[in-house]
Amino acid sequence: MKTLPDHAGHTTAAPVPVRGRLLLGLLLTALLGLATVTASAAERYRLVPLEILPEQSSAVFARDLNDARQVVGDARTRIGNRAFRWTPDQGARDLGSVDGGPVRTTAQAIDAEGRVTGSSAREERFLPDQAVLWPQPGRARGLDGPGDGDRYSRGRALGPAGVVGSARDESGERPFLWRETGGLQLLTAADGGPVFGGALDLNRRGEIVGYAVTDAGPRPLRGTAETGLSRLPLGSANSGRAMRITGDGLTAGIIQLSGGFELALWNAAGELRRPGLEGAEPRDLAADGTVVGRQLTAQGARAFTWSETQGLRHLETLITADSALPGLRLYSAEAINGHGEIVAYGRAADANAVRSYLLIPDVE
């Protein structure tokens, strides 16, 4: 990410020139105005490169977006990762760190209100990263609970029910839920025992998904802070992780088999379904069951979208001819919003680094 020192000496995002920003805003407004459908697997997508301060960054990774088309992620720079939030009218802004210094930050998720979670390194080099909530750019808030000053933590997802993620101390990695009224709470199993692992997503009802680390490998979990986390069935698989959950409880993750891993779906009742997609890892899950993510193939990682009606399709094959880039390879689709828009990252033939892109359903 391109950064410049502000008047206080902190590192902030350099502004896009006014004329360029206006032209870009007009272009994006025209393009984004086409996307009025609800989330679903589109036939074609218009590709919009996200100009996220590329001059001084070696790679830019978009991680999430909301229905307001606000995108968050992180860019690799000379001083390490820098978390950003991008909007069509303002471009990218550096989110900043808890201590205000130019330390590494990562952004993992954004909610409908524009709040962001991820992690920030501490100014003191001997202290580990901590989970962060950004109510807005430049206002990083550490989410450590009482006595957690020496604990590594990272926020992974957020919503009205709070922020979830993982925290590590001398006993191991633990899933947590942070709420404004109760602070950071380490999650337990349904029987009240400790869980070692991580929380990866939650929905509006407070249902949380993630994984537990066991001697036999990771086990997929789902539950609430009140009921505890329970294991989801694996069928004939050896291990797995639950990674995303919709408002009605549909859950997507992966299961590990002897020959590799594949996409797994669990319904609200916890019943396992295997669509048969080998090497497919879900990165996000729409309310209608559309999955986006990355698939490991003989040609490397490829961004995909999957739905019941259209099956699995690699996104780079679905770009409209007038917006395609020569030799574009999309490595991972990271998120899908309620309009069916997708953020992904990859590399075009003439690019010297990984860049991020917004894919907008092409509505005739």
Image (cartoon, rainbow, N blue to C red):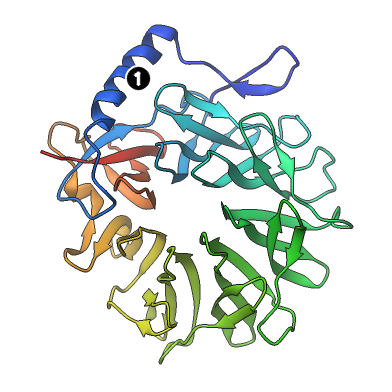
How far across and down, in percent of the image, does residue 56 sit? Answer: 53, 25
In the displayed orientation, state which residue is furthest to the right.
Answer: 147
195 above or below 135? below
Who's the residue at 49% across and 72% down the image? 242
Is residue 167 visible in the rendered image? The answer is yes
136 above or below 26? below
Is residue 262 visible in the rendered image? The answer is no
In the displayed orientation, state which residue is furthest to the left.
Answer: 364
In the displayed orientation, state which residue is furthest to the top.
Answer: 19
How far across and down, in percent of the image, does residue 347 sit? Answer: 34, 40
Who's the residue at 89% across and 57% down the image? 147
Under mark 1, the amino acid is Gly
In the displayed orientation, state which residue is furthest to the bottom.
Answer: 236
Image quarter in which the C terminus is found: top left
Q: Residues within 10 Å of mark 1 (few under 14, many from 20)?
A: some
Mark 1, residue position = 25
Between 153 and 188, the one lying in front of the other is 188
How far across and down, in percent of the image, does residue 113 sit? Answer: 53, 40
Who's the residue at 85% across and 47% down the image? 126
Between 140 and 338, the one lying in front of the other is 338
Residue 168 lies left or right of residue 16; in this view the side is right
Who's the residue at 66% across and 70% down the image? 225
Q: Describe the element under mark 1 as helix, strand or loop.
A: helix
289 above or below 239? above
Residue 309 lies left or right of residue 202; in this view the side is left
Looking at the rendering, which quadrant does residue 322 occupy?
A: top left
How far across and down, in percent of the image, does residue 122 sit? Answer: 78, 42
Looking at the rendering, which quadrant does residue 216 occupy?
A: bottom right
Looking at the rendering, which quadrant does residue 228 occupy?
A: bottom right
